[in-house]
Image: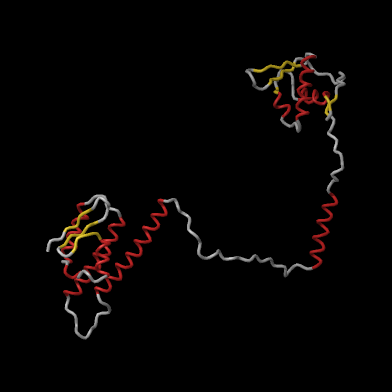
Amino acid sequence: MDLKIAHHQTGKYTVTVPVFEGPLDLLLQLIEHAELDITSVSLAMVTDQYLDYIHQMKNIAAEEISAFLVIAAKLIQIKSEALLPRSAAIEPSEDPGLSLIQQLQIYKQFKEISNWLQEREIKGLRNYLRIAPLPKIEGRFDLSDITLDDLILAAEEILQKEQEKQSLDTVIKAPKITIREKIALITSRLTKGQLSSFNEVIKRSSSRLEVVVTFLALLELIKRYHVNAYQESLFSDIQIEPVSEFSEDEEFEIEFGE
């Protein structure tokens, strides 16, 4: 009995025998409706030629191989049970033909589900409704070790903290910042023959106003020829170099405040 297994451009296999020619899906339908006697096909030839086909092909999808291997394994089982002698006292646990039909029916169900999922993937429908709701987990807070006195004490601590908070009506005055203080800060960082930079002087400034006053103090020192200031490049840090010693007796009457 001649049998050939060809490969369609669609990626499906076609089985050709004298009693049947077509894809696996059609074979399934014929067997389900008892329109084809599967025992009329040479199972040994089916197995041999399918194995030859696997060796000849280089790129075969794993899904196609697994589907046919299930059928081939069942056909080999039916063939072996038909050839081996069987004791008359031992009844078979199930009909081989019926078992094959059941396997094909299961295969058909999975393939229909696979096609349905593939259609949803193509349409971009990747969301699936959850049938059962998520289990509700109730939180538990153990109050067995907490007494009424503990609750009263906790409430008193909270009220005490609220009373300690400063009223929103309180006006907070900004600290007075003077040029004299910033001049003293700059000169304290300068020693004879050593350099400092403006960024080093203002790195601990807490406000923009303090930075501005510090810069004015630097300008005042430059104006009185106590320091020289220069930049090595555009937008670089201002380098400060002492020229003469600063006298604390000098008057700097300008003061700044917010």
Estimate the x, y position of residue 17 in percent, counting from the top left.
16, 62
* In front of the other: 136 or 199: 136
Image quadrant containing the C terminus:
top right
Judge whether 205 appears above or below 17 on screen: above
Looking at the picture, how far across and down is residue 194, in whole percent?
Answer: 70, 20
**Residue at 84%, 26% in the rendered image:** 256
User: Which residue sits at x=83%, y=59%?
Assistant: 156
Direction bottom: furthest residue: 89
Residue 242: horizontal and vertical position, in percent?
A: 74, 17
Quarter of the view holding residue 139:
bottom right
**Viewer-proximal residue among 69 and 173:** 69
Residue 113 versus residue 33 in the image, above or below: above
- Residue 34 in the figure: left or right of residue 231: left
Q: Where, by quadrant of the figure, is residue 35 drawn? A: bottom left
Outermost residue on the left side: it is: 1
- Left-right relation of 130 to 139: left
The N terminus, quarter of image: bottom left
Residue at figure coordinates x 22%, y 57% from the top left: 14
- Please state which of residues 72 and 180 is positioned toward the viewer in this rendering: 72
Q: Is residue 228 above or below residue 75?
A: above
Q: How far across and down, in percent of the image, does residue 26 sit? A: 25, 62
Against 168, is 217 above or below? above
